[in-house]
Amino acid sequence: MIIGVTGTFGSGKSLVAGSIGFNVIDVDRIGHKVLEIKKDELAQAFGKEILVKGKVSRRRLGRIVFSNSIKLKKLNSIVHPQLILEVKQKAKDNCVIDAALLCQLGLDKLCDKTILVKANKKIQIERLLNKGYSKTQIENVIAEQETALGKLKADLIVHNNKTKEEVCVQVKRWLKKQQ
């Protein structure tokens, strides 16, 4: 079984994905790798100021693209094809695809089941502020991701406003019913 786990920035996707007990394909991590593969093309498209010590600064790139939908589309056109290819190569039985953009990337089509993780926006913002993101950045990213999630028909919706233990118990109960 391939399970897709999605939700907006700071909702707790990784917590839910890790609680399932399958191999996790972290699409964010793959995306970081793809940014480095495509860094020359990205620097040409967005300027050399996105590079810090020869590597793509996700924060600098994020400031540019999450405030401009045309630039975000340009970024996606450069990065997404390679990202999708790498995820498809890794997706095997009994794995979890952890991806904020599961539907937008078309990765939901690889999944037998999908889980949508939601959290109170105030809790999400607090979590992400503690990780060093600005409130404006957080709100821009969440707004962009919420648009894509509107189309998802999830098999399970997890409300991640409680303790980690309670969230994991909810996921385990659901998983038991699926097997």
Image (cartoon, rainbow, N blue to C red):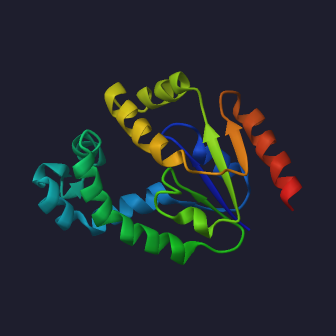
Pick the quarter of the image with the N terminus.
bottom right
- Name the one closer to the observer, 54 or 156: 156
Would you say 161 lies left or right of 145 here? Answer: right
Q: Measured from the top left, where is residue 73 in percent x and y?
A: 29, 55
Q: Residue drawn 70% across and 42% down?
A: 157
- In the rendering, at what x and y percent does residue 54 appear? 18, 58
Q: Could one spot residue 167 in this view of the protein?
A: yes
Q: In which quarter of the image is the C terminus?
A: bottom right
Q: Is residue 112 left or right of residue 103?
A: right
Q: Quadrant of residue 135?
A: top left
x and y percentages locating residue 15 in the rendered image: 63, 44
In the image, residue 75 above or below residue 14:
below
Q: Tell me where residue 64 appears, x and y as whole percent.
A: 21, 43
**Residue at the bottom extreme of this rendering:** 89
Residue at x-position 11% and y-position 53%: 47
Residue occupying the point 52% across, 54% down: 99
